[in-house]
Image: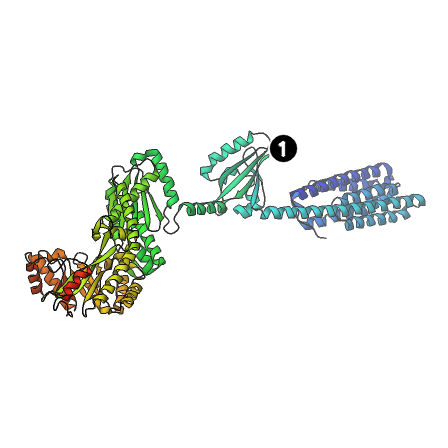
């Protein structure tokens, strides 16, 4: 017979039925002993003693620890033996009793009825059949019993057995359904994402659902009877005590919510959302019922969304939204003391164009880490987008923001190895303090930053109110330049380059001028910086290259060469090689007649990328010159690595070459170095005969300057070329 596992309620039920059955059996047996004493024949009254002993035994059996024993299925199954033994004992007494037939029937039926409360229909029917058999066995000992009475009693017994069997069967079905419902409920509670906890007035846990194991790792049994505060995080206990006190004093059914932390079985802390209901006034509950849900994943997601909303995903710094929010709050609190440093990396676009965006991202991450290491924890460092960063300082505390800007510039200048390339990055920083609003303060810092770029970059500038006028003028100049490009207002002038020993014209350097409709002819100092900052230098440089080559083709003088300067942006432009190739093809000029001039600073920004670009240009057949040599970080290493044909000595060393021994020694060293590397030299800014004489003596190959001719238009160069032996092949 299958015996399902009993819960506490089932154990109580079995224990109660066993003790009730033992009590009834004891009373019935005692009645039998009384019957023996007063009704039986004297010689058989000694039976009273064993019958009384049996009654006492059953009374003792009723007091045994059945609550513990009935948990075992074998004990519950074995108890049927007690009921079975009752029937023959009862039949034996009834056999000798004068009224045994009448006495036996109600007692046997009582045994069957008691069994109905515990056992299935088959056991009840079996006991009923055994009881009927015992009754039939009594009849021979009582020959005077009426057959009508026997038939009636058998009918009654049969009906009782049938009814009790049906009752037992129905009870069994109801019990099974109840167990199924309980198992279903337990499974739902076990797998529920919520834990239901009942705590009494003293704060002790009276009940916890099986999902306690799933959510927190504790078994319900291990926490039952323990104070809830033992599971609560120490920092949350005062809040919990206040919350539960408020809930206890609130009206019945009041619901309150609390976010707290509970200790898991492994010692970690779970962030939980608890909804409490006051059920202390309910006699069936008498507890505060907590519905607890683990919201750790939700809190993690909220933190991730917050980081995405206010954190730059590449560098981990604050983003523009968070920076502007903190800036507005800071200016609202203490506008006069708030300082903003706006940092913009110089020529960052070239890194993306030449090395790829992955290398650009790696560079930004590395530079962001350097910035983070050089600002205070209380300051806000943010990436506003692209290659632009900002620092918000709410309290200078006597510090000079200029000193911080200098330190940041120094750190950013330090070399980096990115994607196998050694890079040096510079930045321009704008500094602004005070302002009526965060928007105004940020705009002022932006103006100061652009002022730093106009100063030559790799510098910082403090905001000055006069920068507004400069900004308006710059915007107007940019618009006029765009119009000038479209209207062909730019012109090219050419400065002669001569062979120093003979002063023979061997080439020209192309220099752009702007024929402004109202201001007249403007030199490059009036517009080149704006063109560089705005990006207009690229289409302007492309136009100068094509115009110079076409003019060289129109002059049609064999051996005559033209030098064209490349700006930093042009040199970083991915289309440079294609532009040069197309310009040569359109003009029909031999590539060897074109010399492209670049500065040292352009090469040192990224020597590896520069080398790749120069080799690509060299493969076209053009010649390459380093302009203003000696003014930057001159290095023998890069001269050896790069395919350079010409070194142009800067005018700073030429001005006093005839009188200053140091300048003379420097020029002599450069000429000697060029000859050793099989390069030609060009001296710039020659204005006197003494300079020309000394440079010839030192062995310089070519020269240019006001001594030989100022920059002039194509017609003037045409006149020079018409002079006898004006131009010829260079050495």
Q: Is residue 48 left or right of residue 334?
A: right
Image quadrant where residue 291 sits: top right
- Residue 673 versus residue 324 in the image, above or below: below
- Quarter of the figure that contains the C terminus: bottom left
Which of the two residues, 195 or 521, is positioned nearer the viewer here? 521
Residue 717 drawn at (x, y percent)? 17, 62
Mark 1 element type: loop
- Residue on which disc 1 sits: 282
Residue at the (28%, 43%) spot, across then down: 472
Task: For label 1, count other residues whose C-alpha is less than 10 Å away and answer few (under 14), some (14-19) or many (20+).
Answer: few
Query: Residue 423: in sight, yes or no?
Result: no
Colouring rule applied to residues: rainbow
Residue 14 drawn at (x, y percent)? 70, 43
Residue at the (90%, 44%) spot, across then down: 152
- Residue 350 versus residue 395 in the image, above or below: below
Residue 421 drawn at (x, y percent)? 29, 61
Q: Is residue 689 left or right of residue 1?
A: left
- Residue 86 versus residue 281 in the image, above or below: below
């Amino acid at each position: 017979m299958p015996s399902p596992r009993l819960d506490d309620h089932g154990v109580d039920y079995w224990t109660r039925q066993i003790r009730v059955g033992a009590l009834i059996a004891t009373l019935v047996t005692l009645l039998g002993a009384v019957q023996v004493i007063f009704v039986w024949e004297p010689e058989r009254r000694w039976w009273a003693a064993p019958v009384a002993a049996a009654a006492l035994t059953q009374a003792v059996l009723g007091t045994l620890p059945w609550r513990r024993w009935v948990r075992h299925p074998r004990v519950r199954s074995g108890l049927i033996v007690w009921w079975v033994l009752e029937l023959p004992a009862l039949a034996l007494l009834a056999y000798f009793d004068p009224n045994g037939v009448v006495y036996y029937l109600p007692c046997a039926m009582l045994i069957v009825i008691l069994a109905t409360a515990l056992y299935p229909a088959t056991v009840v029917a079996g006991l009923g059949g055994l009881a009927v058999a015992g009754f039939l066995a009594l009849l021979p000992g009582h020959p005077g019993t009426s057959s009508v009475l026997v038939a009636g009693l058998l009918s009654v017994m049969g009906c009782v057995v049938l009814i009790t069997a049906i009752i037992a069967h129905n009870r069994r079905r109801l019990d099974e359904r109840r167990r199924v419902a309980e198992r279903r409920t337990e499974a739902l509670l076990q797998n529920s994402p919520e834990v239901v906890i009942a705590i009494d007035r003293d704060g002790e846990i009276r009940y916890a659902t099986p999902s306690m194991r799933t959510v927190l790792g504790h078994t319900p049994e291990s926490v039952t009877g323990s104070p809830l505060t033992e599971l609560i995080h120490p920092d949350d206990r005062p809040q919990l005590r206040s919350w539960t006190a408020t809930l206890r004093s609130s009206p019945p059914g009041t619901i309150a919510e609390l976010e707290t932390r509970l200790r898991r079985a492994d010692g970690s802390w779970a962030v939980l959302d608890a909804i409490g209901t006051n059920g202390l006034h309910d006699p069936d509950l008498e507890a505060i019922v907590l519905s607890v849900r683990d919201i750790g994943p939700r809190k993690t997601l909220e933190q991730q969304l917050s980081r995405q909303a206010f954190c730059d995903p590449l560098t981990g710094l604050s983003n523009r939204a968070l920076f502007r929010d903190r800036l507005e709050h800071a200016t609202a609190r203490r506008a006069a003391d708030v300082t903003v440093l706006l940092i913009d990396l110089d020529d960052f676009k070239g890194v993306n164009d030449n090395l790829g965006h992955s290398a650009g991202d790696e560079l930004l991450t590395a530079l962001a880490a350097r910035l983070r290491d050089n600002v205070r924890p209380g300051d806000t460092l943010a990436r506003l987008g692209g290659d632009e960063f900002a620092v918000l300082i709410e309290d200078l505390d006597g510090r000079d923001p200029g000193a911080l800007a200098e330190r940041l510039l120094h750190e950013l200048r330090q070399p980096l190895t990115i994607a196998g390339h050694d890079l040096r990055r510079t930045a321009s920083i704008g500094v602004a303090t005070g302002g009526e609003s965060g928007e105004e303060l940020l705009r002022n810092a932006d103006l100061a930053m652009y002022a730093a770029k106009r100063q030559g970059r790799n510098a910082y500038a403090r905001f000055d109110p006069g920068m507004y006028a400069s900004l308006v003028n710059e915007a107007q100049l940019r618009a006029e330049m765009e119009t000038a490009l479209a209207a062909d207002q730019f012109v090219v002038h050419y400065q002669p380059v001569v062979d120093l020993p003979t002063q023979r014209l061997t080439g020209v350097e192309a220099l752009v001028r702007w024929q402004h409709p109202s201001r007249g002819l403007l030199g490059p100092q009036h517009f080149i910086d704006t063109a560089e900052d705005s990006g207009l230098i690229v289409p302007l440089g492309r136009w100068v290259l094509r115009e110079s080559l076409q003019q060289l083709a129109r002059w049609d003088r064999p051996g005559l060469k033209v030098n064209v300067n490349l700006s930093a942006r042009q040199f970083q432009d991915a289309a440079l090689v294609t532009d040069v190739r197309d310009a040569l093809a359109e003009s029909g000029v031999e590539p060897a007649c074109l010399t492209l001039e670049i500065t040292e600073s352009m090469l040192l920004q990224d020597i590896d990328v520069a080398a790749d670009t120069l080799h690509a240009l060299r493969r076209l057949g053009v010649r390459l010159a380093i302009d203003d040599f000696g003014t930057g970080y001159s290095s023998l290493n890069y001269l050896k690595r790069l395919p350079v044909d010409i070194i142009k000595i800067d005018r700073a060393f030429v001005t006093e070459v005839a009188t200053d021994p140091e300048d003379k020694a420097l020029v002599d060293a450069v000429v000697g170095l060029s000859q050793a590397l099989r390069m030609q030299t060009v001296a710039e800014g020659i204005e006197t005969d003494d300079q020309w004489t000394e440079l010839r003596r030192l062995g310089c190959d070519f020269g240019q300057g006001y001594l030989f001719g100022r920059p002039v238009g194509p017609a003037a160069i045409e006149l020079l070329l018409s002079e006898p032996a004006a131009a010829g092949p260079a050495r």
